[in-house]
Amino acid sequence: MAKTMSIRMDDESYRFLSKFAKDERADLSKAVRDVVCRGRIMLAIERYKKGTSSLGRAAEMAGVTVAEMLALLAEYGVKSRLEKEDYIEGLGNLAKVW
């Protein structure tokens, strides 16, 4: 269920969001939701890149699957920190549930 919230922001941010909404042919609420969604993804990428989040945690933070997170990391040129052992462990876990 969607929640409603009220926020305060500076004039420059409001002008940016208003212009963004106009450029995207969307209302201001949709523009804010889009920026928040994109921000979640960028925050997750940044934390994964710095090593402060695991791949799974970054995917959770971004609101995407691990596979989608891997694709996003590749799209932004972030190298995976997964090691051969991680893949072997993943295959072992898959074999257990398959």
Image (cartoon, rainbow, N blue to C red):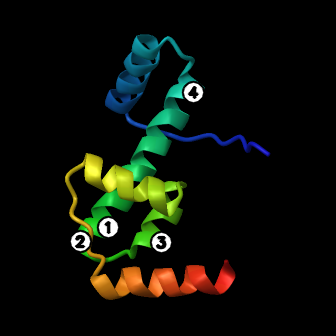
The residue pinned by badge 3 equals 56
Q: Residue at x 31, y 55 (%)?
A: 73
**Residue 13 placement, left or right of 34:** left
Q: Position of residue 33 (x, y in %)?
A: 55, 36
Q: Residue at x 52, y 87 (%)?
A: 92
Image marks 4 and 3: residues in contact by CB distance under 8 Å = no
Image marks 2 and 1: residues in contact by CB distance under 8 Å = yes
Q: Residue at x 50, y 27 (%)?
A: 31
Q: Position of residue 69 (x, y in %)?
A: 42, 57
Q: CA distance from mark 2 to mark 1?
A: 5 Å
- Residue type, label 3: Gly
Quarter of the picture containing the C terminus is bottom right
Q: CA distance from mark 2 to mark 3?
A: 15 Å
**Which labelled disc corresponds to residue 30?**
4
- Residue type, label 1: Arg
**Which labelled disc corresponds to residue 50?**
2
